[in-house]
C-alpha cells in the first residue's frame, strides 16, 4: 500500500510540475496522477512478489 501512496504523490507532483511549466491543463495533471498510481501499484506488486518468493525460498530450505 505504501508504493501506491508514493506513486500517487509522485504522479501528482509530476502532473503539477508539467501543468505549471509546460501546459496548463487539468487533464495532464490527472493523467500524471493516474500514471503515478499505476507505477506505485506495479512497484507494490513486485515488492509483494519478492517478499513471497523469499518466504517460500526460506521455507523450503534444508538448513
Image (cartoon, rainbow, N blue to C red):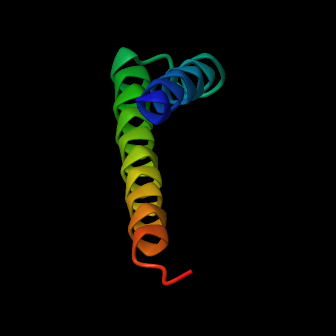
Q: Quadrant of the C terminus?
A: bottom right
Q: Where is residue 20 shown, x and y percent of the image?
A: 61, 16
Q: 58 and 4: which one is in front?
A: 58
Q: Where is residue 19 shown, x and y percent of the image?
A: 54, 20
Q: Where is residue 55 shown, x and y percent of the image?
A: 44, 61
Question: Looking at the picture, does residue 17 appear above or below residue 51?
Answer: above
For image coordinates 41% across by 69% down, the residue present is 59
Q: 23 and 10: which one is in front?
A: 10
Residue most toward the bottom?
A: 62
Q: How many marks?
A: 0
Examine the image and state in which quarter residue 16 appears: top right
Q: Where is residue 18 shown, x and y percent of the image?
A: 58, 27
Q: 32 and 10: which one is in front?
A: 10
Examine the image and state in which quarter residue 34 appears: top left
Q: Quadrant of the N terminus?
A: top left
Question: Looking at the picture, does residue 46 appear above or below residue 20?
Answer: below
Q: 34 and 19: which one is in front?
A: 34
For image coordinates 36% across by 51% down, the residue present is 45
For image coordinates 40% across by 77% down, the residue present is 60
Residue most toward the front?
A: 63
Question: Looking at the picture, does residue 59 appear above or below residue 39?
Answer: below
Amino acid at each position: 500500500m505504501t508504493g501506491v501512496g508514493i506513486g500517487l504523490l509522485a504522479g501528482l507532483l509530476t502532473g503539477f510540475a508539467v501543468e505549471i511549466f509546460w501546459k496548463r491543463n487539468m487533464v495532464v495533471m490527472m493523467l500524471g496522477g493516474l500514471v503515478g498510481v499505476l507505477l506505485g501499484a506495479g512497484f507494490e506488486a513486485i515488492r509483494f512478489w519478492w517478499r513471497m518468493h523469499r518466504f517460500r525460498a526460506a521455507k523450503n530450505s534444508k538448513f
